[in-house]
Image: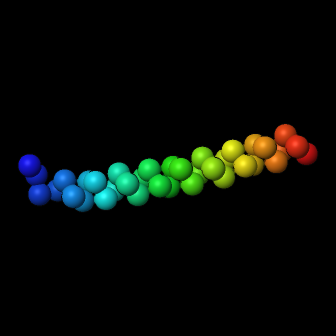
Amino acid sequence: MWLETPILEKITRQIKEILERVLKIWVLEIHSSKVL
């Protein structure tokens, strides 16, 4: 086990959260543009 694993886990969680937010915003923008 590395000492860095907790840090990597935190980073991956943050990346996943950011990606989810970006995807939600992107999908919303696509839907709004389609409606318009």
Task: Give the x, y percent position of residue 17.
Answer: 47, 55
What x and y, as percent, mark residue 5? 19, 53
Q: Work out which residue is located at the far right of the displayed protein and give it.
A: 36
Determine whether, in the image, residue 33 is placed left or right of residue 19: right
Percent coordinates x, y for residue 6 in the rendering: 21, 58
Taking 25 as reference, is 14 left or right?
A: left
Point out the image quarter for the C terminus: top right
Asked where in the image residue 10 lies, by quadrant, the reply is: bottom left
**Residue at (42%, 53%) from the top-left corner?**
15
**Which residue is at 50% across, 55% downward?**
18
- Relative to 18, 32 lies left or right: right
Toward the top, the furthest residue is 34
Q: Is residue 30 above or below residue 14?
A: above
Q: How are the residues colored?
A: rainbow
Q: Residue furthest left?
A: 1
- Residue 4 lies, in percent from the top left, at 17, 56
Residue 4 placement, left or right of 28: left
Q: How many numbered marks does the figure carry?
A: 0
